[in-house]
Image: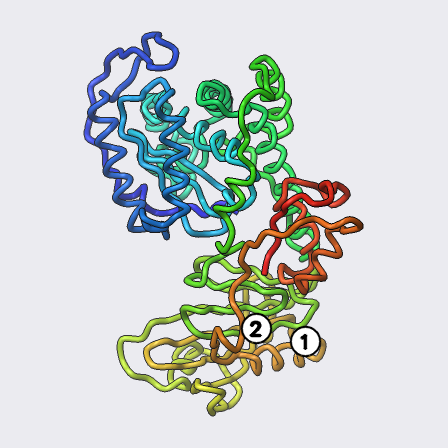
Amino acid sequence: MLRLIPWFCCLGLLMLMPGCATNPVTKKSDFVLMSEDQELALGQKAAAEVAKQLPLLPEDDPLVRYVDSVGQRIASVSDRPELFYRFHVVDDATLNAFALPGGYIYVHRGLINHLNSEAELAAVLGHEIGHVTARHAVKQYTQLQAYQLGAAVASIFVPIPYGITTITDMLAIAMVRGFGREAELQSDELSLKYIAKAGYDPQATIGILRMLKRMEDLDALIRKDAGDKVERYHGAFSTHPETEKRIREAAAKASALLSGWGVTKRMTFLRHLEGYPYGDSPEQGAVVNQRFIHPKLEFQLRFPDRWAIQNTPASLNARVRKQKAYFQLTLKELVKRRRADEILAQMFRHKRMTSIERGRQDVFEYAHAAVDTSAPHVSHAHVEAWVFLKGPKAFIMLMWCERNHVSEYQKDFSDIAASFRSYIRERDGDVPRITLVRWQQGDSWHKLARRCHDKLGRFTAQKLAALNGMGLKETPAPGTWIKTVR
């Protein structure tokens, strides 16, 4: 679920002189290659690039102000209270948070949605503050300098992985994805220390780690159901130590901090979430059961029940579950007026296509043709291609399957293309948004899913349970306020 961003290409560091500095957390001397001034300058430059690349909620947004108030409370009791900490909310569905040197903290709305108390939010922010106070980026830079020196010799015999060619590439990836097992465990420990000092219940850390494990399992279930290969990467840049091990270690540390006396502020936290999108925002489009709506680009389409849908920053993708039938929709911004059939002909200019069909569908000019060629996951594919055109926006829709199975999917292809039309919020509804309801006697997550018309798709019940920090078989007490979607 992690979306890497390309800002690390712009970090460009100067040659730095080695030296020793006292670590603010351990109070011991660290051998580092970056002064504090250089560390702060790096963070400031990286933050400017992040602001260009990621969809950040504005500083005056109520959720951002709330996150900032909690973050400042934690930062004030940290080991580097003299820094000016800046807290940002990334407006997407990703379950992630990261920190840049100098006190720039980012938490994605998708992660905030799946927390269930202010204490849990404090624990997330405390973890990221821990990366800043322990100067993990500085230590990572020093380690990578040594790596780069060795790689200069080793790469003669062992090629460096494509796309990771510079020290700044690797440093930036570490900033977003994690600094390795030792640093992540240290940040867990610092988070426990900081939130306890700030008056929060340190047991909240355990709830977060269990939530992450639950979401990891749910993501694997969804991918397996779609027929995708489930891979859990455990290489040099794996995001965190093994989740279950982190849960056990955090539990042992939390129990030593007299947990239970601190505040959780559950209802305060839940009220701040109400009305925000559950998943992607209107600017990014959203999957609503078997529909995809994009309020900003003003279009929608519908998929048959057997299709699994995935929205990504680059394209809308779908496939028939566990079958080799695929869909992809991309947007092309035109700089010159062109007809839909001209765009389609240009796309397959070296291929033998069927005759191009032209027409209008709702407010869109369209063109359609078919071609036999190779395609992702299918070497000998039959590809159905559509171009829907409105002004300077060309929506390019491709659907493909194995050539000898066209008859099995032709109706699906035609129905999906025929469903492409304009979107009007008043007529077609909004993206799923979080709302609060009381759990009733006799309720279940499946009943709750039916009441919200399974808006979150095939696994709505599991997603609603996870949204509230529970498994499918766990239930809150009657009268408890919970999160659902509308």
Q: Which residue is mark 1?
A: 409
Q: Residues within 10 Å of mark 2 (few under 14, many from 20)?
A: many
Q: Residue furthest right?
A: 442
Splitting the image into 4 quarters, where does residue 382 fall?
A: bottom right
Q: Position of residue 470 (x, y in %)?
A: 68, 41
C-alpha span from label 2 to label 1 = 9 Å
In depth, the one of 26 and 439 nearer the eye is 439
Residue topped by disc 2: 399
Measured as percent of width and height from the top left, residue 263 is found at 53, 27
Is 407 on the left-hand or right-hand side of 188?
right
Q: Name the spot of residue 425 as percent of width and height, x first.
A: 48, 73
> Which amino acid is tagged 2?
Met
Residue 228, above or below 192 = below
**What is the residue that sits farthest to the front in this orientation?**
479
Looking at the rendered structure, the secondary structure element under dot 1 is helix
User: Residue 251, located in which quarter of the rendered image?
Assistant: top right
Residue 305 seen from this side? yes
Question: Considering only vertical position in the picture, is 49 above or below 458?
Answer: above
Which residue sits furthest top? 28
Between 186 and 264, the one nearer to me in the picture: 264
> Contact (CB < 8 A) between labels 2 and 1?
yes
At which x and y percent is residue 56? 36, 50
Q: Residue at x 21, y 26 (%)?
A: 38
Identify which amino acid the numbered label 1 is placed on.
Tyr
- What secondary structure is found at the residue carrying circle 2? strand
Quadrant holding the C terminus = bottom right
In the rendered view, tell whether residue 419 sits above or below residue 83: below
